[in-house]
Image (tube, grey):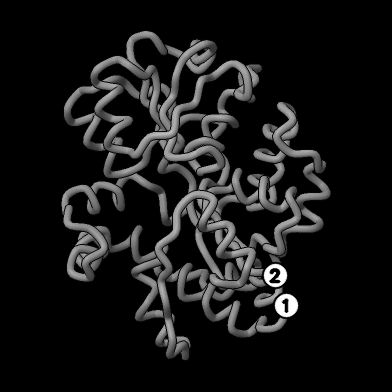
């Protein structure tokens, strides 16, 4: 999203604003119209569509990025039962991803896992101490844990099936904005998808631009992220499959009431994405 800024200007946008919001704040900002377009994790998007938020999922960006790190007490996802896991906040991408993983192996995340709300750095410290059993994270936190040999990777969504087969991060828009401004929406999507290709094709340059732009201070971590996450494969996956997959997981444990078909009907639109797939083939 940060790398897309000059590409958005090339598409004709003159006023571009990034809003600092995470977890439920981001979904609220999108629903209210404070944000027009945003990249977010699939499962919470499903959750917000089910809740009736006026948002529409527009495209898939990439698979992967999240990792479940466990102590020796968690060698498999099924061993999360009765354990404590650190997440940023309930309703955050971390929480929803772990809930989806748990539901897939037959656990009920609402009762089987003790979620504690902690900043990422605090979760990492407590994982090292052994006072929590698991942590859901994304770069650079997971890179740091691996480098320090703290815990071990239980699930890597970039490489482990079935998670590696579905979009992790997707592009969503405020429904009113998308309906009123389809041309602007398509132009914004084009810029962001081009930026996604840039992450894949020029990882060093992309990482350096993020550092130079003040978005991160850690060049090595940014470069490693660009190399590890399969940004260049967004054309190969079906975004509707991802929405259906996560909707099924959340429906299984009663975290949403709507059927996957209803979520797809009410909260997705793939027309522009399909057009851009053709336009951006090369």
Kindly identify which residue carries mark 2.
Answer: 175
Q: Say if 98 sits above or below 32 in the image.
A: above
Q: Say if 53 sits above or below 244 in the image.
A: below
Image quarter of residue 6: bottom left
Circle 1: is it few (<14), some (14-19), or many (20+) Cα within 10 Å?
Answer: few
The percent coordinates of residue 141 (x first, y second) are 28, 39
Kindly identify which residue carries mark 1.
Answer: 179
Q: Residue at x 17, y 27 (%)?
A: 148
Using residue 217 as the reference point, say whether residue 95 is left or right of it: right
Q: Secondary structure at mark 2?
A: helix
Report the front residue among 168 and 134: 134
Q: Secondary structure at mark 1?
A: helix
The percent coordinates of residue 100 (x first, y second) are 60, 31
Using residue 22 as the reference point, say whether residue 206 is left or right of it: left
Report the front residue among 158 and 219: 219
Report the front residue among 240 and 9: 9
The percent coordinates of residue 23 (x first, y second) are 49, 49
């Amino acid at each position: 999203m940060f790398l897309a800024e000059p590409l958005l200007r090339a598409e004709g946008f003159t006023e571009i604003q990034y809003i600092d919001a995470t977890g439920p704040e981001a979904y609220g900002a999108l629903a209210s119209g404070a944000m027009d377009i945003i990249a977010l994790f699939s499962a919470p998007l499903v959750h917000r569509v089910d809740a009736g938020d006026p948002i529409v999922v527009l495209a898939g960006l990439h698979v992967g990025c999240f990792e479940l790190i466990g102590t020796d007490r968690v060698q498999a996802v099924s061993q999360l039962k009765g354990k404590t896991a650190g997440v940023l906040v309930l309703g955050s991408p971390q929480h929803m991803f772990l809930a989806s993983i748990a539901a897939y192996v037959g656990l009920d995340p609402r009762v089987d896992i003790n979620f504690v709300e902690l900043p990422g750095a605090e979760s990492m410290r407590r994982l090292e101490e052994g006072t929590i059993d698991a942590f859901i994270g994304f770069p650079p936190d997971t890179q740091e844990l691996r480098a320090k040999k703290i815990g071990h990777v239980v699930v890597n969504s970039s490489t482990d099936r079935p998670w590696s087969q579905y979009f992790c991060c997707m592009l969503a828009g405020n429904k009113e904005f998308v309906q009123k401004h389809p041309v602007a929406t398509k132009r914004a999507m084009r810029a962001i998808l081009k930026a996604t290709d840039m992450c894949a094709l020029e990882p060093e340059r992309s990482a350096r631009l993020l550092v130079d732009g003040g978005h991160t201070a850690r060049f090595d971590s940014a470069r490693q992220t660009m190399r590890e996450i399969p940004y260049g494969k967004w054309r190969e996956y079906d975004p509707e499959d991802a929405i259906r997959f996560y909707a099924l997981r959340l429906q299984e444990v009663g975290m949403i009431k709507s059927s996957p078909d209803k979520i797809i009907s009410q909260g997705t639109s793939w027309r522009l994405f399909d057009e851009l797939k053709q336009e951006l083939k090369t």
